[in-house]
Each structure stands twice: as structure tokens, then as C-alpha cells.
Image (tube, grey):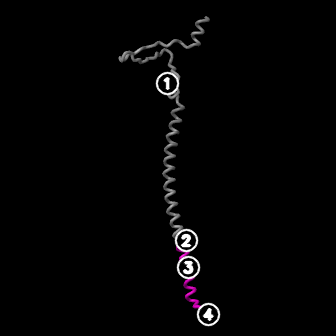
Amino acid sequence: MRFVNYKILIGIIIILILILILKNIAGQFVQIREGGSVVKNLRGELFEKQNRNKFLQEQLKYVQTDKFIEDESRKKLGLVRQGEFVVQETLENGNEKIVEEKLSPPNWKQWLELFL
């Protein structure tokens, strides 16, 4: 039988176990640091999304007001209030000339006047 020094063998096994434990601890430490940077990035993204949400909520409140509806109908549809007139700006030979047009009554009034 061979002579085996059990004290040395047990020491080597203990050292190997300690090295494995230290390796696992170091790996977990690296994961924690990476997780911290991920959390930091997600917090920044959350802050941006909250600001965007506030902006969109304010836009929604503005869009639901009568002022917005009136402004958009004036811009996009060319609607005006009764008694108002449109001022158009035209260019003629490089000189600016302002032309005023009196709006005609709505179509339904014209039809009513035509038949009555």
C-alpha cells in the first residue's frame, strides 16, 4: 500500500473548495454591478416616459377644449363666425396688396332665400 498523506490531501480539497466559493462570489458581485447599471438605465427611461406621459396628458386636455376645436376648424376647414370676414394677402408684381372678401352666407341660407 502506498503512503498517502491525508493532511495534505484534505488541505488541497479545502483550498479547491475555497477557490470555487471565491469564484462564485466574484461572479455574483459582477452580476450585481451589472444589475445596478441596468436599474440605473431603467430609472432614466422611466423618468423620460413619465415626462412624455405628462406632456401627452396636457395635450389631451388642450385638444378637448373648445378653443382648440375652434382654432383647428378655422385653420383646416376655413370656417369663420357669422359676421366675420376673411383677409387674404396676395402678391402682385412684388408689392403686397391686402384683399378683403366678405363671406357669403352659408349654403343652407342661400337655398332658403332662393325658394322663399
Q: Upstream in the sequence, badge 4 or badge 3?
A: 4
Question: What amino acid is labelled 4 in the image?
Answer: Arg
Residue placed under numbered mark 4 in the picture: 2
Foreground: disc 3 or disc 2: 3
Residue placed under numbered mark 2 in the picture: 24
Measured in 3D between alpha carbons, the distance from the residue under mark 4 to the one under mark 1, in whole angstroms, is: 101 Å
Measured in 3D between alpha carbons, the distance from the residue under mark 3 to the one under mark 1, in whole angstroms, is: 79 Å
Question: What amino acid is labelled 1 in the image?
Answer: Lys
Give the farthest residue toward the front: 2
> Are circles 3 and 2 on residues that touch, CB within 8 Å?
no
Residue placed under numbered mark 1 in the picture: 75
Q: Upstream in the sequence, badge 4 or badge 1?
A: 4
> Are circles 4 and 2 on residues that touch, CB within 8 Å?
no
Residue placed under numbered mark 3 in the picture: 16
> Are circles 4 and 1 on residues that touch, CB within 8 Å?
no
**Residue appearing at x 51%, y 56% in the figure:** 39
Q: Is residue 95 left or right of residue 58?
A: left
Decide which of 57, 16 is in the foreground and name it. 16
User: Hey, which quadrant is residue 87 in on the image?
Assistant: top left
Considering the numbered disc 3 on the image, is that residue within a helix, a strand or a loop? helix
Please provide percent x and percent y for residue 21.
55, 74
Residue 20 highlighted magenta (yes or no): yes
**Residue appearing at x 37%, y 17% in the figure:** 96
Decide which of 96, 77 is in the foreground and name it. 96
Question: What amino acid is labelled 3 in the image?
Answer: Leu
Q: Magenta residues?
A: 4-22
Q: Upstream in the sequence, badge 4 or badge 2?
A: 4
Q: Look at the magenta stretch and give its main secondary structure.
A: helix
Foreground: disc 2 or disc 1: 2
